């Protein structure tokens, strides 16, 4: 019998997150205080984050233990399954073996609860009453709203306005978990009001929504800010994905030659790739190919400049060195809202700058066509963001076919389609255009 899915028991779930900073050949560039130009201190971050998350953000220790309370909630959906995409392989007529880690089984339908749960846990322990955040497509907002419900925290979500309109079902899910959802830019903050004064019809951006969420957090001692990607501690939490995949591929008697993930802020790609990249950096495995895929409409890694920039539009955040399109960049209203951020994780940007990872950018219609191909063979309709990883994996499999080589490909299917009818219609239009 050909095995299709590899399931870990709960007692095999990772008990510690992996910090790739411990294995990098050179340290990341420092984060700067924009007022002084000097490296920020832990104290500078305390208005935004609890001390445990700050420690995870700046530390280079190799692992952090996952608290028991977090593990108990993780067990509601973790470990997640690893699938061998046998039907897709057959449809592509490729000698490649394709595996995907399926994160769409979480209650919120994506990989985002992997960091939402520990962030809410550490804030609750610190006595925080309220968390503010931003969300693009709503995957992160849904996940933090879920975590807020579990830990009794009030959640305020500033949702990019174009997605607020496109994704009413995501907004409804956040509200069902008890969150308050605000279309951004809004008139609730100085940052939002200044944008609306200049651009009354603004569709918004993640940079603008971050400004609003940060502004609200720093004005209240009982409120902190939570971010769903980009930051080091967020990428750290997501490594449970790759750590589980390592064990599952060992069950399959296999190991990936190529690892693919989509990139918006960096957490999805880091989650699947960092444990495998760490094994390579430690000399436990030879060179592997890592492919980070982003939308051509927001090409941060492929066309952005690697330089110091603000993480938000109103310049309320520290200065970080990252691949960026500029903090004032407002992308097109593409449906892959989770990938519409002007910057990239400083940690992932540093790793790309070291030449350890390849980057690719694809158009939305090509990615939707790949997602429909995947849905017709594997039965899962990926989220618009996840379609980028599907497209990257299919291209690698077709390259194996052209070259007549058999390689093992692993990608992260980070979420399922859960949005507006117009988003699904675009997928259908892509289907008619490409005949898949």
Image (tube, rainbow, N blue to C red):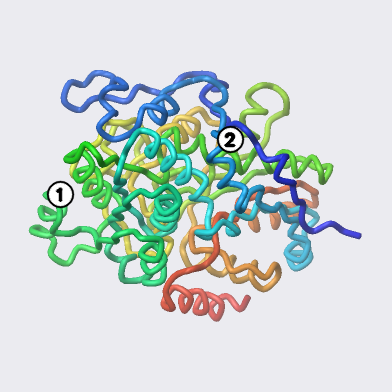
Up the image or down, 394 lies above or below 124; here it is below
Secondary structure, mark 2, is helix
Q: Nearer the viewer, residue 111 or 327?
A: 111
| N-term-proximal mark, 1 vs 2 | 1
Q: Nearer the viewer, residue 319 or 308?
A: 319
Q: Nearer the viewer, residue 35 or 17?
A: 17
Mark carried by residue 274: 2
Residue 344 screen position, x and y as percent: 40, 41
Up the image or down, 156 lies above or below 230; here it is below
Residue 295 screen position, x and y as percent: 44, 56
Q: Hey, which residue is sitting farthest left in the picture? A: 197
Residue matched to label 1: 191
Up the image or down, 66 lies above or below 415; here it is above
| Separation (CA) of disc 1 from disc 2 | 35 Å
- The quarter of the rendered structure image containing the N terminus is bottom right
Residue at image coords 69%, 53% = 81
């Amino acid at each position: 019998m050909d095995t299709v899915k590899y399931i870990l028991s709960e007692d095999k779930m990772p008990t510690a997150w992996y910090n790739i900073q411990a294995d990098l050949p050179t340290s990341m560039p420092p984060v700067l205080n924009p007022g002084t130009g000097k490296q920020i201190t832990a104290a500078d971050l305390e208005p935004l984050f609890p001390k445990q998350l700050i420690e995870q953000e700046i530390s280079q220790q190799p692992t952090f233990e996952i608290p028991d309370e977090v593990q108990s909630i993780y067990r509601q959906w973790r470990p997640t399954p690893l699938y061998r995409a046998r039907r897709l392989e057959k449809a592509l007529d490729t000698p490649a073996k394709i595996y995907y880690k399926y994160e769409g089984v979480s209650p919120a339908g994506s990989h985002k609860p992997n960091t939402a749960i520990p962030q809410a846990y550490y804030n609750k322990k610190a006595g925080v009453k309220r968390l503010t955040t931003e969300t693009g497509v709503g995957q992160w907002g849904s996940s933090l709203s879920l975590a807020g419900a579990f830990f009794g925290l009030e959640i305020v979500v500033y949702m990019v306005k174009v997605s607020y309109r496109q994704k009413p079902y995501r907004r409804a899910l956040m509200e069902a978990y008890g969150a308050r959802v605000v279309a951004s830019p809004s008139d609730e903050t100085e940052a939002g009001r200044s944008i609306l004064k200049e651009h009354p019809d603004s569709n918004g951006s993640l940079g603008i929504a971050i400004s609003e969420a940060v502004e609200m957090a720093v004005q209240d001692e009982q409120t902190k800010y939570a971010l769903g990607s980009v930051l080091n501690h967020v990428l750290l939490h997501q490594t449970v994905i790759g750590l589980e995949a390592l064990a599952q591929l060992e069950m399959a008697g296999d190991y990936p030659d190529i690892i693919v993930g989509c990139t918006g802020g960096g957490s999805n790609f880091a989650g699947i790739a960092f444990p495998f990249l760490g094994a390579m950096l430690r000399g436990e495995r030879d060179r592997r190919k890592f492919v980070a895929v982003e939308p051509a409409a927001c090409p941060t890694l492929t066309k952005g400049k690697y330089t110091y920039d603000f993480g938000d539009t109103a310049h309320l955040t520290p200065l970080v060195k990252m691949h960026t399109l500029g903090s004032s960049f407002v992308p097109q209203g593409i449906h892959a809202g989770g990938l519409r951020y002007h910057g990239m994780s400083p940690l992932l940007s540093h790793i790309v700058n070291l030449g350890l990872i390849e980057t690719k950018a694809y158009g939305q219609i090509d990615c939707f066509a790949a997602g429909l191909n995947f849905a017709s063979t594997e039965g899962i309709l990926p989220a618009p963001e996840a379609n980028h990883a599907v497209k990257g994996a299919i291209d690698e499999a077709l390259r194996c076919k052209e070259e007549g080589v058999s390689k093992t490909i692993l990608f992260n299917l980070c979420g399922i389609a859960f949005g507006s009818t117009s988003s699904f219609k675009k997928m259908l239009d892509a289907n008619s255009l490409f005949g898949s």
